Amino acid sequence: MRRHELDWVSLIAGIVFTGIAALYLVVAGTDLSIDHRLVWPVVFVALGLAGVATAVRATRREEDTFAAEQVDPAEPAE
């Protein structure tokens, strides 16, 4: 199997949704309570931050690739 790059957005989404599910399981099994008004904003903020981090990383990778492909004008072409 070919190794692929880590997809940060999918990883963070999975962690956030797993965390929410675990939170609801704990609340259902105990006397704890949560403020349901905060669940969706936390999900959207986490996914937004993951999306921004992925975009920044992709941009840096493209810049590095572009810089590596540039030919130094002082060197003679073969």
Image (tube, grey):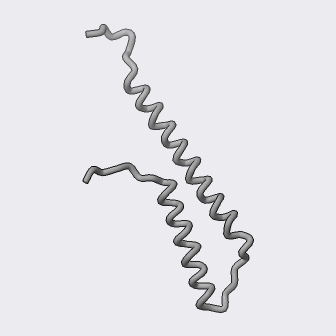
Residue found 34% across the figure and 50% down from its top? 4
**Quarter holding the C terminus?**
top left
Residue found 61% across the figure and 59% down from its top? 46
Residue 59 pos. (x, y %): 51, 37
What is the quadrant of residue 32 in the picture? bottom right
Residue 76 pos. (x, y %): 30, 8
Left/right placement of residue 47 relative to residue 66 reads right
Residue found 65% across the figure and 58% down from its top? 45
What is the quadrant of residue 37 in the picture? bottom right
Residue 11 pos. (x, y %): 47, 59
**Quarter holding the N terminus?**
bottom left
Q: Nearer the viewer, residue 55 or 74?
A: 55
Picture layout, residue 34 above or below residue 46: below
Residue 74 pos. (x, y %): 37, 9
Q: Residue furthest front?
A: 1
Picture layout, residue 17 above or below residue 77: below
Residue found 48% across the figure and 54% down from its top? 8
